[in-house]
Structures are given as C-alpha cells and as structure tokens.
Image (spheres, rainbow, N blue to C red):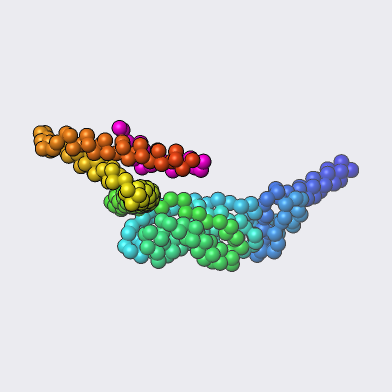
Amino acid sequence: MEAFGALVIAIFVILLLLILMGVKTVPQGSEWTVERLGRYTKTLSPGLNLIVPFIDRIGAKLSMQETVLDIPSQEVITKDNATVTADGVVFFQVFDAAKAAYEVQNMHIALVNLAMTNIRNVIGSMDLDEVLSNRDQINARLLSVIDQATGPWGLKVTRIELRNIQPPANLLEAMAKQMTAERNKRADILNAEGDKQAAILRAEGSKQSAILEAEGKREAAFREAEARERLAQAEAKATQMVSEAIAGGNVSAINYFVAQKYVEAFGKLAESSNQKLILMPMETAGVLGSLAGIAELAKDAVQARTAAGGTGPQTPSPWSGQPR
C-alpha cells in the first residue's frame, strides 16, 4: 500500500509539472509564436495560454509596440556631386508576428540596411539646395518606399526622419559667403528703395512748394494789377476834374499836374543808389509859384461849392490834400 501511494503521488506530481510546462503567460504588448515539431502553428496573444509540452515550443517573442531604430550616419553624393553626411531614425511596429519572425532574418539589421540604401537613392537624385530645403519631401519619399518594402515582413513603418544633413566644411564656408552676399544685396536694395522714396518725397515737396509759390505770385500780380487799375481810375477822374476846372476858366489847375510830376521826378532822382551829388539848376521861385497856383486852385474850388449851396455830397478834390 505504501508503494502504491508513493506511485500515485509521483504520477500526480508529474501531471502537475506537465500542466505547468504547458501554461504560458504572454505579457501585454507582446506576441509569441508557437512551433510544433519545428513548424509554426499559432501565435499566442497577451494573457494566459496553453501549449502541449514536449511537442510545442515557443518560437519567437516579438514586441508589438512601436519601436525606434537609429540609422547610422553615412556619406551620400547628391545629384550635383556634393558630398553630405546624413543619418536618421525609423519608427516601426510589428503587426504580424508570424511574418516578422519567419519572413525576414534579423529584422532590425534588414530595416537599417533598407533605410540606408533608400536614403542614398533619394538624396542622390536631388541637388544640394533641394536636399537642404526639402527635408519633408525626402522624409515622405523614404516613408513611402520603405513602408512598401517592409509590408511582406509584417512591419508597418510609421515615420522616418532625417536627423542630420551635414555638408562638408568647404561647402559650409561657401554657403556662409553666399548668405552674406544675399543679405548685403537685400540691404543695398532696401537702401536704394529708401533713397528712391526720399527723392520722390523731396520732388513732391519741391513741386508743392513751386505750386504754392506760383499761386502766391499770381495772387500778388492780381492784387498789383487791381491796385494799378484803381490808381488809373483815380488819375483819370482827377484828370477829368482838372479838365473841367480848366474849361471853366481856372487856368491854375494845370499847375497841379506840373507840380506833381516835378515832385515825382525829384524823388526818383534823390532815391537813386549811384547818385552822391545832386545839382538843382532850377528856380525856387518857379516851384513856389506852382505851389501857390495849386493853393489858389483849391481855394477857388471851395468857393465854388459854397456858392452852389453845398447841400449834396461833396466830392474831394484831387489837389485838396496837397500842402499849401
């Protein structure tokens, strides 16, 4: 009986060990492949799974999370024969564990080599300026080509980014000189535009000033012409009144014009800038006689108004304001 009991216990322990060997717990974010006698049979999902001990075995343990893979730097020749150094990163995810395990050997190395090859192809088909300015376009082309190539491997490439594109030192120096020249050119253009605008504004100011000056001269000429017209009208009226006085028998009125012209000529002679000495070969008595005639004419005019009654408005005589 004791031997039988020991045998039962041994069988029970063996069965327990077999069950424990067939229980597999897959962590979250991973999938395991199962091989039966060396052949793939199924994929274990996260959680508790059972396999047949000694017949089934775990083949590959794959992470289903998105993975980042570095692309080492390499020298690439562009279309215009410029050498640049480029590196990058690849983001990929396994969506089919069986294909990732059995369709490609060493998945990471294969993906790195594929990415490096396509980087050389894409950059080699572009000029240096396009490579430096169209990085997004390069990334999009690389993503399209690499994702299509890795589809049969059970991989999904989500992103690929060029991390660094480094031209050689001589090209960097030439680019720096070109950038400096471009900035100097833009500065010269801005200075020229500023000078142009300043010249335009100065011309506009001169134009407005000339217009205002011309308008002022026109207004002054108009005023001067109006003044001359009024003066001519006054002289004509004075001449008419003197003529009427002479026609009435008062000959002394003519002395008014003689004295007026005499005084004007004498004033012009005295105001001349190049005259330092003035000779007056005229008789003082003649001048006094002319002035006396003017005074007498004024007196006769006053008496004539008094005799007429002086009821209406009186017209001032042109010689009434002259000194006696």
The percent coordinates of residue 22 (x first, y second) are: 74, 52
Whole-percent x and y of residue 164?
43, 50
Does the magenta segment cover residue 323?
yes
Closer to the camera, 300 or 295? 300
- Based on the displayed image, in which of its 4 quarters is residue 148 positioned? bottom right
In the image, 35: left or right of 119? right
- Residue 195 appears in the figure: no
Q: Quadrant of residue 105?
A: bottom right
- In percent of width and height, residue 223 lies at 38, 48
| Foreground of the two, 73 or 25 | 73
Pick the front one: 85 or 186: 186
How many badges with numbers are in the image? 0
Is residue 48 in view from this perspective?
yes
Which residue is painted at 16% across and 34% down in the image? Answer: 284
Q: Is residue 123 magenta?
A: no
Segment colored magenta: 310-324
Seen at 28% across and 43% down, the residue is 252
The residue positioned 10% from the left and 34% from the top of the image is 277
Screen quadrant of the C terminus: top left
Left or right: 91, with 168 as reference point: right
Image quarter where the N terminus lies is top right
Most common SS among magenta residues: loop
- Identify whether 134 is placed above or below 163: below
Please name whichever residue, 141 or 109, is drawn nearer the observer in this view of the structure.
141
Residue located 42% across and 65% down the image: 121
Q: Is residue 194 above or below residue 270?
A: below
Name the side, left or right, on which 104 lies relative to 321.
right
Q: Is residue 36 left or right of residue 243?
A: right
